[in-house]
Amino acid sequence: MSDLDIPKLKLALTANADDASREAYALICNLQTHIAELEKLQAEYKYLEDSFLRLEQENLTLRTVGVTMDKRVAELETQLNEFHNIVNESIGVAGFHLNGEVATWEYLGVTGESNATIQD
């Protein structure tokens, strides 16, 4: 902002001013209004720019998390498929009971129905 003392300038111009002086005064006042508006717009622009940069960083973070989650989902699907292969190729778990009997998948709660639910 300029160091002009607008009230004193106005007083001097109104006491003994010609048209050019009055016009100059009006232009100075108008300029000060525009400078204030420009400062406000600059502050708003800075805020928006900071917000955009923050959102851009959050977007990058979410993309990274998404890729990590996709990779983890793929790993879990592979492990689940391996488990289903074991269930489909066997009748249960040997050595689960101390008496030597095989614990069937049904006994352990792994039935065809739960197997299908897990696959969904």
Image (spheres, rainbow, N blue to C red):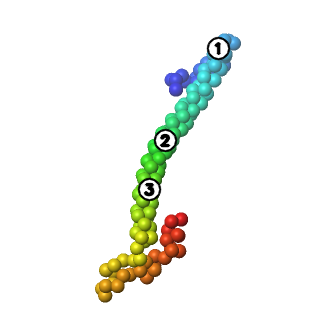
Q: Please identify the residue farthest to the right as the structure is shown.
A: 19
Q: Mark 1 or mark 3, which has the lower sequence index?
A: 1
Mark identifier at residue 74: 3
Q: Please identify the residue farthest to the bottom as the structure is shown.
A: 99
Q: At 40% from the left edge and 69% from the top edge, which residue is drawn? A: 86
Mark identifier at residue 21: 1
Above-or-below relation of 40 to 62: above
Residue 48 visible within the image: yes
Q: Closer to the observer: label 1 or label 3? A: 3
Q: Is residue 98 left or right of residue 50?
A: left
Report, in whole angstroms, how far the alpha carbon at label 2 lies from the one at label 3: 27 Å
Report, in whole angstroms, how far the alpha carbon at label 2 lies from the one at label 1: 51 Å
Mark identifier at residue 56: 2
Whole-percent x, y for residue 41 in the image: 57, 32
Q: At 41% from the left edge and 80% from the top edge, which residue is drawn? A: 104
Mark identifier at residue 107: none
Determine which quarter of the picture holds residue 42. top right
Whole-percent x, y for residue 68 in the image: 42, 52
Q: Residues within 10 Å of mark 2 (few under 14, many from 20)?
A: few
Q: Mark 2 or mark 3, which has the lower sequence index?
A: 2
Q: Mark 2 or mark 1, which has the lower sequence index?
A: 1
Report, in whole angstroms, how far the alpha carbon at label 1 lies from the one at label 3: 78 Å
Kind of residue indicated by mark 3: Ala
Kind of residue indicated by mark 1: Ser
Q: Residues within 10 Å of mark 1 (few under 14, many from 20)?
A: some
Dot 1 lies on which element? helix
Kind of residue indicated by mark 2: Glu
Q: Closer to the observer: label 2 or label 1? A: 2
Could you say which is closer to the camera, residue 119 or residue 100?
A: 100
Determine which quarter of the picture holds residue 108. bottom left
Q: Residues within 10 Å of mark 3 (few under 14, many from 20)?
A: few
Q: At 40% from the left edge and 73% from the top edge, which residue is drawn? A: 90
